[in-house]
Image (cartoon, grey):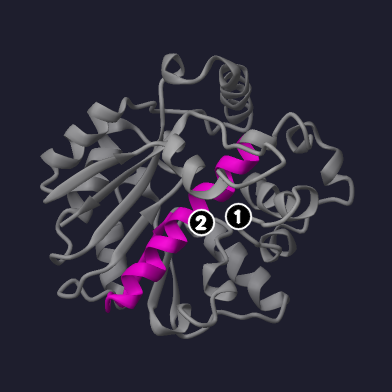
Amino acid sequence: MRTALWRALHCEVDPPPHVLEDELGLKLAAPDEGWRDRQDMNQQQTRHIRAAIVARARFVEDLVIEQAARGVGQYVILGAGLDTFAQRSPDVAPCLRLFGVDRPGPQEWKRRRLTGLGYGVPSFLRLVPVDFEAGHSWWEHLATAGFDASQPGVVASTGVSTYLTKEAIAATLREVGRLSPGSTFVMTFLLPIDLLEPEDRPMMEWAQKGAAKPGTPFATLVRPTEMLALAREAGFKEAQHMSGVTLAQRYFSDRTDGLQPSSGEDFLVATT
């Protein structure tokens, strides 16, 4: 919910050009009228983390579009949440088999919201219910939903690894590592606080406390070298670390408003 609202807030309060335009997430979330006055939506205090959220989404979607142009026809979103790529990308999404994987409860809620708003669930989008931490194999559920393991795909996981144990992360990497050659896995991970820029550390501490209150505490913070080692152990052909600094240079270097993403969340990009 918070991620969807930050994405919407980016379009409302940050001047164009917008790194990502996603107003449908706000419609799905349907927050109370005063959501903009919440502390976690403060325009100034959250502007850097808001920028990081839209940067990571833009990076993944650019990667998917690039791979689709090369003939990759499958896109899997692990921890899909309120992702709206299927609805916002009419030129690309219908050409893919798109699988949104998430916990059963949120999946059913999202299905109802999409239906209630008149979007429905198009034939190319499969909502796949899986409980990652309960020992359920998302791989088996994915196959049942129509994923073709003999063909390459893009698998993305953003904002998820932090809430998983290191064992669950390693298991996910091993499963993705079994994908057909030419597949790409892209995943965000949060850095230990000592690797953050000093000005971003208070926000990270605030985020940790906020995540713990509803019973979803941060479980794993990972150093880039450790994440690369996990990917190699899982059998990936290539693995690279993409820093938040790189995304800042890619999407924010020409801005005149000083908007920059916070440090603390980086990417693993691995290929089979």
- Highlighted range, magenta: 49-78
Percent from the top left, x then y, of residue 89? 54, 75
Please tell me whether residue 116 belongs to the stretch shown in magenta.
Answer: no
Drawn side of residue 157 relative to residue 116, left or right: left
Callout 1 crowding tier (Cα within 10 Å): few <14, some 14–19, many ≥20: many
Q: Residue at x 57, y 66 (%)?
A: 84
Can residue 43 be seen in the rendering of this structure? yes
Callout 2 crowding tier (Cα within 10 Å): few <14, some 14–19, many ≥20: some
Q: Residue at x 40, y 84 (%)?
A: 95
Percent from the top left, x then y, of residue 247? 46, 44
* In the rendered image, the vertical position of residue 22 relative to residue 88, given as above or below: above
* In the rendered image, the vertical position of residue 165 relative to residue 121, given as above or below: above
Percent from the top left, x then y, of residue 167? 25, 34
Q: Residue at x 48, y 42 (%)?
A: 249
Percent from the top left, x then y, of residue 199? 60, 18
Amino acid under label 2? Answer: Arg
